[in-house]
Amino acid sequence: MKRLLIILISATTLYSCRKLDQPITREYTEEAYWRDADDAIAAVNSCYENMSNDGYFFGNEALSDNAYVNGIGFDNVTAIADGAYDPSNARVTNEWSYRYTCIRKCNTVTTNIDKVPNLDSTLKKRILAEARFIRAYSYFQLADWYGDVPFYTNLITINEAKNISRTPKADILNFVQSELAAIRADLPVNTAYADQDRGRITRGAAIAFSARVHLYKGEWQAVVDDCEQLIGRTDNGTYSLQSSYKNVFSINNEYNSEVILDLQYGGGRTFSTQRSFLPQTVALLRSVLVPTQDLVDDYVMLNGKGITESGSGYNENNPYINRDPRFEATILHDGSTITDFNGTVQTILTQPGSNPATNSVDDQGASPTGYYFYKYYDPTASNYNSSLNLIMIRYAEVLLMYAEAKNELGQLDANVWNTTIRALRVRAGFNDAGATVYPSTTSDQLRTIVRRERRAELAFEGIRPFDIRRWKIADQVMARPVRGIKVSGGAFNKDANGYIIVENRIFNNPKHYLWPVPTFERDQNSNLGQNQGW
């Protein structure tokens, strides 16, 4: 997939896609399209382009208590996070149109593929399955953000679009689940794709995404059933944890055994988003997408205890030692080192009064919270433009879904623990028995452990905002100030313990659990109605 050109399909014109070394030699109109397998493949490739993007992937993190965006970047997600938005908000408006653009592309494939003469039946089934997966993914995103939304699987007319009403969220999620079950047999396993097709939807992706949908609905046994199709089996794909947590996200280790579904870059498609989260020392810009103190505080100690638990060994005056190794692989803090694009090792200095003499640039004040994200840093990027694939589903999440579902069913025993939480912690670098041995405790206490583990393992992967909503804790964790590092002196707004207060947030229940239907869409269609409180 990285070697395929990214193409666009509009309502009236379809353009062919070839490998980079095979230039386009023919012009296409919709009437002249659908002539051969290349046309069908080009059409489904266009669907992939709208499955997601780097702005949503990274920006979603700031829709949770994990991160903060300074300013109106990432389609003004900060306004959403602090509860100061309305139906005309850029992210609210753009997400809706982005998803429906993707759905139209997918419907174009499913509606027209029968026009291709003599198309190999196995290839046809695969292309249809890919389009149906991406369409299901788009509907899932819409339903999760907006609740009830318009639903259709054909190419509706402009007039129909102006009069369509919304379908209940439950019905849409049922459709998503039925689609994911129906397409499994038509999708190859991950090891069956040739190199030029790596990155396409696989059977494992359909199963893992199905587990995620069941997870978000609280259908615990169905989550277990899906995960057990992937854990310890190879008939639905071959997946395993990488030996190094940090290397999972390296451009030198793409398509590794942990990747189930990733957002494809390359072939001319790149992203420069890392300029928004790297230290000024590296990117020569003030960072706008930054981790929060609340995320930092949630990483456990090497003995498995939270920093506020008795016997944890946490030292507030030396807070970054003996912490979960994934912390250092995800977040840069005062005293961290990073190798910049020129190969120079830079020391991050964010505490006021630090001496920047060892660095080319002073990081003090460059991050609103005093922290930076490190995960997904691509030092090979050309002028900050990276072609690194962004992982949307990985095997570690399957293990976490399995552990959560088993606990909710009262079945998280030592065997399940060893397969899931212990495996993840050992891979991360824990070796203290307090962190790795199954804790004989209550389901409520295990729930806290599993949720904290999920947060640490998946931080900066765009998962957290969906988790806090399905757990119904968003009205708690998002109704708190965004905090940064602890400082002494200086003209900072600080809490009683000396931690920087970056901004105050508001999250009203139930209003903010769903986004409003965008103003522009309601102006076009009076049948859409509006969500509660908007």
Image (cartoon, helix red, strand yellow):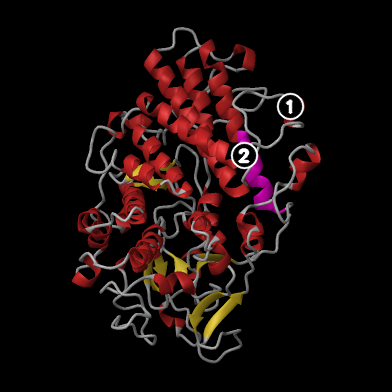
The answer to whether residue 480 is above or below residue 520 is below
- Tag 2: residue type? Pro
How far apart marks 1 and 2 lie (CA) works out to 18 Å
Q: Secondary structure at mark 2?
A: loop
- In percent of width and height, residue 250 lies at 34, 52
| The one of 347 and 136 positioned closer to us in this rendering | 136
Q: Residue at x 55, y 44 (%)?
A: 141
Given the current orientation, which residue lies at the most extreme bottom position?
489
In this picture, residue 418 sits left or right of residue 404: left
Q: Is residue 432 visible to us here?
A: no
Q: Quadrant of residue 122?
A: top left
Image marks 1 and 2: residues in contact by CB distance under 8 Å: no
- In percent of width and height, residue 42 lies at 50, 24
Which quarter of the rendering shows the C terminus? Answer: bottom right
Instruction: Give the residue number, with chain letter if any, for mark 1.
Output: 160
| The one of 94 and 228 positioned closer to us in this rendering | 228
Classify 10 Å Cα crowding around label 2: few (below 14), some (14-19), many (20 and above): some
Q: Secondary structure at mark 1?
A: helix
Q: Quadrant of residue 12?
A: top right
Magenta highlight on residue 93: yes
Instruction: Give the residue number, with chain letter if any, for mark 2.
Output: 168
In this picture, residue 231 sits left or right of residue 327: left
> Magenta region: which residues?
89-101
Name the dominant secondary structure of the magenta segment.
helix
Q: Is residue 219 visible to us here?
A: yes
In this picture, residue 280 sits left or right of residue 195: right
Magenta highlight on residue 296: no
Upstream in sequence: badge 1 or badge 2? 1
The answer to whether residue 423 is above or below residue 166 is below
- Tag 1: residue type? Glu
In this picture, residue 388 sits left or right of residue 61: left
